Amino acid sequence: MTKYEPVIGLEIHGELLTNSKMFCSCSADYGSAPEPNTNICPTCTGLPGAMPVVNKKATELAALVGLALNCSINKHNTFARKNYFYPDLPKGYQISQYELPIASKGYLDVLEDTDAKQRITVRRVHIEEDTAKLAHEKNYALVDFNRAGVPLLEIVSEPDMRTVEAALSYATKIRAILRYLGVNSGDMEKGVLRFEANISVRPVGSDEFRTRTEIKNLNSFRALTRASQYEIERQIKVYEAGGTIVQETLGWDDAKGVTTSQRSKEDAHDYRYFPEPDLPPLQLSDSWIESIRAQLPELPEAKTKRFIADFELKPSEAQFLTSERSLADYFEAVIANAKSSPKIISTWIAGEFIRNVNELNVEVNKIPAKTLAQLIDMVTDKTINGNAGKTVLAEMFKTGGDPAQIVKEKNLAQVSDEGFILETVNKILNDNPKEVDEYNAGKDTLMQWFMGQIARATKGKADPNIAKELLVKGLEERRK
Amino acid sequence: MQLHNLTIREASDMLATKKISSVELTQAVLQHAHEVESKVKSYVTITDDLALEQAKQADERIAKGTNITPLTGIPFAMKDCISTRGVRTTCSSKILEEYVPQYNATVTNKLADSGAVLVGKTNMDEFGMGSSCENSGLFPTHNPWDLDRVPGGSSGGSAAAMSASQATFTIGEDTGGSVRMPAGFCNITGIKPTYGRVSRYGLISLVSSFDCIGPMTRDVHDCATVLEAIAGHDEKDSTTYQTAVPQYTKIINKSVKGMKLGIPKEYFVAGMEAGVESSIQEAIRTYEKLGMEIHEVSLPNTRYALPVYYLLLFAEASSNLARFDGTRFGLSVSENAKDVIDIYLKTRQQGFGDEVKRRIMLGAYALSVGYYDAYYLKAQKVRTLLRRDFESALASVDVLLGPTCPTTAFKLGEKTSDPLEMYLSDIYVAATNPAGVPALALPCGFSNNMPVGMQLIGKHLDEQTLFQVGHAYQQVTDWHKKLPAL
């Protein structure tokens, strides 16, 4: 049987976090509009005679993304009209970029820590405007233009990906980069990021590009993964049955888990692109480009490498901590404020800390970095033990209190007084002769039970190392 | 003296010296406009109430003596493709017959700020597509010099209204001769400014890269006065120049002695009406007498001007007119519609006239995959050649002189059956729009009792020289003072 490999290319549409829309001064924050069609003006509703004016901030953000994706910035780039009729498109054309996008020919490395490591070519990054929103009723549809004209960035890859994992890694990394740059919230549920996958399959070893299909409007990583997998399998089945693939645009039915045909090549739009005569070309100077480059923050990949090198973290730990810029910044802020090692801090943040953040659905900086540093240091210098640390942390999330204060109030300071601990150990061993005998007969698991009894009796304050040492000694003494 | 026949300069002087009020002037103009309107039919809308209200405000301004401009209190009419808040703006199309804009064009605001008084909106070829005003989707306009003849187009209503003294000045729009050609037919003065000199914001686009709003007036001095008021950078129109607007009228009296006048040989070819050619030759001799040097120059690509002009027009217009889909404003035909596509089809079928449909189809074709390179792209390349033609001809002379049309005004119905014949009437005026250069049209005689127009073509942003040269001519001739008998 023939073995197939997929050939995948991705188009990613992301809204740009600007104050105003792409070509007018209406707010880009359409989500905050009180009612439909309140965040509009002659330009974004396409009234006769209204004209577009380029949003400078959007060009800066687009260039920033281009530079982050290692693209070259086209100093002379132009807007174009993409002509088609649809009620969500007020002018009958979308202003986009076609022949000369703002950035082109970049790359992004994916799956770096695996054998499947690969460099994906970014073909182009261009600016365009979002459409209005349609609400379909039974016999009619309503149009809300609040979103019309919001700046969108389209990032187009070459069909370089050969696995769904690579495509997913690429999409995930793009999202992280957009969030790092502060150009997109990455809020997938709000639809600020949408994927489009171009897929074909071919026999392994072949270098031909076969007929591809295009799956539109994938709104989550899960949808991207499932739709791609489904489509790859569907195409393989068609080839196996001796059929051919038809070039078409597909939709993804998430509930049924199938792709559905929306448009075949025969009824594909001819968008009649031509240069937008209402907007002169964007002329970008070298100094402008350099000023944008100077704004580039350290990106996830570089940060991961630095964390591994500087803080001696495992790649998986570093990747987790750099997955969000806010988390990475927080991690470094805690390091700056703590005496404990980065390794210990990493364990805390990736463990208890993030568990609380996720559970309570709060921002990472809910607890000031300095305060978390104090708590971790208290565990490290054995003022409290690890269990008490967890309790204090939970309390800090709840009340926002100071760790030293909480330890005091809850009387959690660790006891290292051997006399006191020995007294407790002896009492427990004397009270439980049956368990002592069983342990000494070989039931090792009872050690945990004894430790639990000690913790309970001391309200978790006993230094666990000392407690264990005395416990082992006491059990040994009682061996018959 | 009849108030409606005053030039801006005369009226402005009388307003300043309180000999008349703006209300009196406006009432006189309105009364005359109504009197002759049934013959000429220049207006789509006459805004009596609004005009009198604005005239009152102008009088208050004049009484206070603050913020007075040469246009304060002066009644004007505007081509119906320029948006006026609260006043319907139809483009003389069925599809916009009831459309009332929610906002003002920049030019509308500038004129309002200057204190000018809007008396109405003038008829035009539908969306500017035509050279006779017969393509108006509403009704045709007649030439005040002979009511059986056309006023020219597409700013036919503005030209006829100015010619018939139905306003003290009018505003036209020139995409490929639409100010100059009717100005010539109706014996008035009009300018197509440099592309980007006047904001297009609020102008309902025909061809975004050609469209130029320009004044149509009794004489060159008035023309300069109005352009000064409406020109300038607009942050809402990215294609406007940042360059400051000169005070055109300040140096308009400068002598033209020693300046160089270029005569493009390609503009004097077979097919020109004899009386037109002799009038132009006479004008050249007048300039010679004024001390100008006359030089023959060449615009070698002139023969490509019309195909390039029309091709690019079709292409851009097909896209500019896409927004008229019956979903948000204007005509909407949804009865018995199966779906939204059906609404588009029905609305556009009923709303657009034949010429508009013809041009949309041709434009969509020229932009289609497989044809784009051969038509649109090729036309853009030749457009560059046209621009170079003017640049190199104007490198050695100050201005060019030529006719505005090979003939005088033709009869209504004479060319309507043959669109190509109609297109040919733009042969002298169309080339300047793809090139972007400014051109001033002014009266230069009569042929068979109908007015003949000539145009002066200048360098980019050099309207000043055009006004200077045009004004010098009107100081020694009185063609521009001749009024039609209505």
Image (spheres, helix red, strand yellow):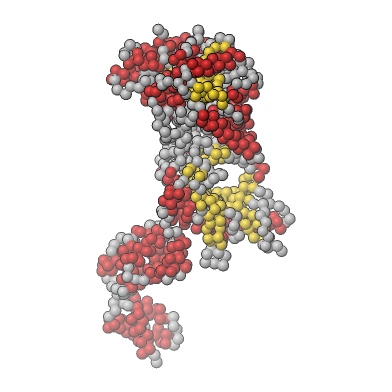
> Would you say B306 lies left or right of B463 here?
right
Q: Nearer the viewer, residue A421 or B213?
A: B213
Instruction: Determine if residue A259 is in view.
Output: yes
Q: Give residue A166's quadrant in the image.
A: bottom right
Q: Quadrant of residue A334?
A: bottom left
Q: Position of residue A457 (x, y in %)?
A: 32, 76
The answer to whether residue B180 is seen in the rendering is: no
Residue at (39%, 90%) from the top-left corner? A479
**Residue located 55% across and 64% down the image:** A117
Image quarter (top left, top right, bottom left or bottom right) of the N terminus of chain B: top left
Residue B68: image location, x then y, percent: 33, 21
State the count of labels: 0
Kindly give the residue lying farthest to the bottom in the view shown: A480
Horizontal side of residue A77 vs B416, given as left or right:
left
Point out the residue furthest to the right here: A242
Q: Is residue B301 above or below residue A405?
A: above
Residue B140 vs A16, above or below: the answer is above
Front residue (pair A133, B114): B114
Residue appearing at x 31%, y 18% in the figure: B62
User: At which x and y percent is residue B96?
Assistant: 52, 25
Q: Residue at x 45, y 51 (%)?
A: A64
The front one of B231 and A7 is B231
Q: Nearer the viewer, residue A226 or B232?
A: B232
Rendering coords of residue A409 (x, y %): 26, 67
Where B248 falls versus A22 (above or below)?
above
